[in-house]
Amino acid sequence: MSADKALPRGAAAPQAAVPGPGSPVSDAPALLRVRDLHVHFPLGGGLFGPRRVVKAVDGVSFDVRRGSTFGIVGESGSGKSTTALAVMRLVKITSGTVHLGTAEIGALEGAALQRERHRFQMVFQDPYASLNPRKRAGDAILDALNLMNVGEPGQRPARARELFLQTGLRPEQLQLFPHQFSGGQRQRIVLARALAARPELVVCDEPVSALDVAIQAQMLNLMLRLQRDFGLTYLFISHDLGVVRHVCDEVAVMYLGRIVERAGRDALFAQPLHPYTRALWSAAPSFDPDARSRRGRIRLQGDPPSPLAVPKGCRFAGRCPHAQAACKEAEPPLREVAPGHAVACHRVGEAGQVLY
Amino acid sequence: MTAPVLQVCGLTVEFATRRGVARVLEDVALEIDRGQTLGVVGESGCGKSVTALAVMRLIASPPGRIVGGQVLFDGRDLLALPEREMRRVRGNRVSMIFQEPMTSLNPAYTVGDQIGETLRLHEGLSRREALARTVAMLDAVGIPAPAQRVHEYPHQFSGGMRQRVMIAMALACKPDVLIADEPTTALDVTVQAQIFDLISELRERTGTAVMLITHDMGAVAEMCDRVAVMYAGRVVETGPVRAILGDPLHPYTRGLIACAPGRRTVAPGQMLEEIPGTVPSLLERGAGCLFADRCAQAQPRCRQALPAPTVLPDGRAVQCWLHAEAA
């Protein structure tokens, strides 16, 4: 809805202080610090033979700077959504640490975790599944305010109206049920609810993937505007490279539970180093019909291996067009080859020179 | 110029709903030449899938009803055929693949049985001949060890492999037209690239005409020769891909292209162009252009009547008052 215009566009004072997308954020302090995160899911076992383990996230580290957007891209099974859920403390962390500012949210439990929850909130892919169909939109937001004890109880309805206006919805729509909204509007409700407690970090798991392209643009613009106005930090999970390129300041590429490459947006899209990143970029459809010559394209064979049976050595070696014997022996560490650009590949040199 | 293998004209489809009759397709015209790929693009609810189902005569009736128009396949109107004859066309001369391969495959039969059934039914092959052809088809769509996998069940295949099975089944009888309805939407991008390559390669080899239904302009740029842009049940602009992506004429086409993120012409972090509002209700169409309420260039006459489509020298047609005088 064009009611987006209700937002104080550009009027916000902190614009200069808060680095928005596109501006250099490298000097802003890290808000979220994830170190050596592992999330393993035990599977079966007992009666039917040996216990097996799905290593959904298997040693992931990254920093997200305050006021920036950090993207994680990857295909199904790469562990990107599980990483998001682990940061949100919605799955059990097997090992590793997650710091939000100075608080180690990865280690908090019970009431202590509950007290910190208002600082980090989440938006899921399917807005219809995220809303209770029997609850009015306004009540969904009031519930969040009550649960996290935001402000004085008497002020909360006014806050709900304010949130609706900020996300481009009309206050009279607070009375409606989820099915009375369009998909794009529902995602706005979910965003309004996530922002209810004035979080510092918003974790977004494919927030626009279920939306049509025109509605997607409205939603992305809204998210960018809210970030500028409120200094939000986003952890943005997506499989859509176009969307990631548009909104993220830094991007990590995940493959089978690990980060294979991590860099600032411009470096990563202009000069991808990992063969998987290159394959991913080259698989994305280009808008230019003249660029569709099949030559010079990297085509991967087969599907990613199962996270149940992670191969020895480099996880990508089995599908990599440039793999050598050494790649199947040892797993390459993620190392920085240029300021802010890290890659895990045996065939990239110390200074980031491509050896394949 | 040879006659197009598939030509849709004046196609109008209505659905009865609790709140009245919704006209979901109105006066749709499309054509595809042999060996060509036509992209049909638009947002959800624009009628692109219903168009495909109408061509295949797969619209459930009631609630749906084909009110008017023709679907000319090799000069014959499919809409006028008796069902028995249509069954000979469907899956044989014109076949279709859907978005979600798992729901289109029968989980209780091996993939070999399912592909073989098509061949035995349409081509009268024996069980053994059908099996041999099926193995060859699976091989052609890039399934490793086809002689073994032909005896496996759909759940034993990954998503990309299942879509390959669907393509093998759709192409088993060497159809003249393949309709692909969002064939890669459920797949990862590297697998999507494999499927697109496969469809292009098979098209080049067999001369099958392809109708690719998608919401993704990138897929259109990648795959199609011509494109038809649909909005609220009408084709608003159609023509060669280069012309339409390079210089869209209809304000809706322009908006659809401009609001996609990730193109080189949009700076990251900048506001994307928006098409304000949402798609209109199809229950009351009125006489004017249904895009008028969302169109920045709408004029009073846009709400009163639609102009006749303007045909340009580069082979495109656009239905908009902004371009009506030019002709």
Image (tube, coloured by chain):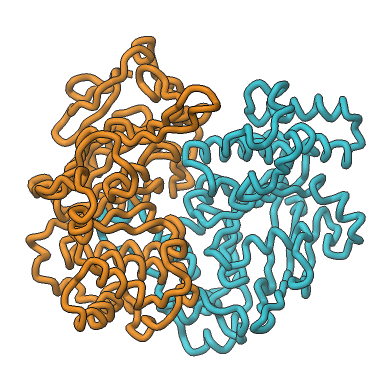
Chain colours: A orange, B cyan
Where, quadrant-wise, is the C terminus of chain B in this rendering? bottom right
Q: Quadrant of residue B137?
A: top right
Tell me: B170 left or right of B274.
Answer: right
Q: Position of residue A53 (x, y in %)?
A: 42, 29
Q: Position of residue B200 (x, y in %)?
A: 61, 39
Nearest the viewer among B246 and A68 is A68
Tell me: A21 left or right of B322.
Answer: left
Nearest the viewer among A108 and B97 is A108
Q: How many marks?
A: 0
Q: Is residue B322 visible?
A: yes
Nearest the viewer among B152 and B57 is B152
| Residue at 65% from the left image edge and 50% from the top image edge | B98
Q: Quadrant of residue B62?
A: bottom right
| Residue at 71% from the left image edge and 36% from the top image edge | B168
| Residue at 77% from the left image edge and 38% from the top image edge | B114
| Residue at 16% from the left image edge and 30% from the top image edge | A338
Q: Is residue B312 visible?
A: no
Q: Position of residue A202 (x, y in %)?
A: 25, 57
Outermost front residue = A47
A205 vs A270: above or below: below
Tell me: A177 left or right of B108.
Answer: left
